[in-house]
Amino acid sequence: MESWNRESLLHYAQYKQSEKDISKLDRAISSITETQMLCSYHYRTLHALLDEHMRNNPTESSLFRSRFSVNTEVNNKDFEFTLACRANIIAIVRTLHSCSDIVGFVIYLGLCLNHNDSTWITPSRVSLYNVKEKLKKFPESLELLSLLGQLTNNSDYKHLCRLSNQTKHSIIVRAQSHFNLKEKDKERYQFIFEEVETEPGGTEKFSETNAIPFIENEFKRQNDIVINILHCLDKLVSVAI
């Protein structure tokens, strides 16, 4: 993540927040960066798995045999490869999904919303959605609200949330492994997210999606907007200090 100076926000918050809450705020700010680092780690690990598999199976025929062999050892290796890839994909989905609520927590403590009766939120209910609702009370938050809207009012963001929440609360979303021999190099390796309901119990669904480009694009999109959100926070508190 692009560097951002946390000191302005911490300096602003320290006038009202307790030492305990300042410590929480500092940890939450670090957690935004850590979330990006964890996603990057799983992404690199995923691509290392693909690179190794591609080196071991350089031709179309060897790739085909790695999946459809009658040899038990080969089948076990394919199972382990697929499981490892899926594990990293799901880890990215769940970790990236957590980032928005961490951002909400940073905003909540950083702007000292917990010290205003009209913006106080029960601690267990602090989420980006609830923080956004409270920010609507302040005209000076229009730019920040616009950025938060860019982050969350997006079909891929909502799709990612459903993938993560379904995996967490009911059924692990499958990223089915396929080899597309019409493609070249790592593009041959495709993990397809099955379609999921847009809302639990609803009739509308998010379509099947090629997982790797989906998480690549959504990671970059969210990362860019989160950086802008942090800079916007910096502007807000710099004016107030």
Image (cartoon, rainbow, N blue to C red):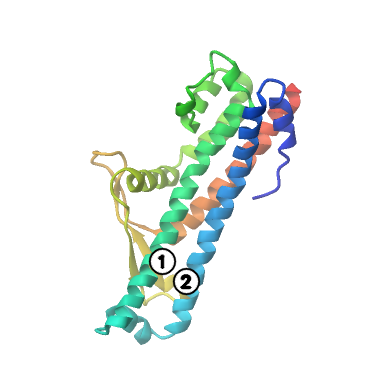
The disc placed on residue 49 is: 2
Instruction: Name the outermost residue toward the top.
Output: 117
Task: Name the residue carrying label 1.
Answer: 84
Q: What is the three-letter code of the residue carrying label 2?
A: Leu
Q: Position of residue 109 (x, y in %)?
A: 60, 28
Quadrant holding the C terminus: top right
Q: Position of residue 22 (x, y in %)?
A: 66, 30
Answer above or below: position of 81 versus 22. below
Q: Are marks 1 and 2 in contact (CB under 8 Å)?
A: yes
Q: Where, by quadrant of the figure, is residue 12 drawn?
A: top right
Instruction: Answer with left or right where residue 137 lies relative to residue 58.
Output: right
Q: Nearer the viewer, residue 230 or 113?
A: 113
Q: CA distance from mark 1 to mark 2?
A: 8 Å
Please rate how many residues cluster around mark 2, counting C-alpha atoms within 10 Å: few if below 14, some from 14 to 19, many from 20. Answer: some
Answer above or below: position of 160 versus 135. below
Give the residue displayed 48% in from the left and 77% down from the top: 52
Circle nearer the N terminus (1, 2):
2
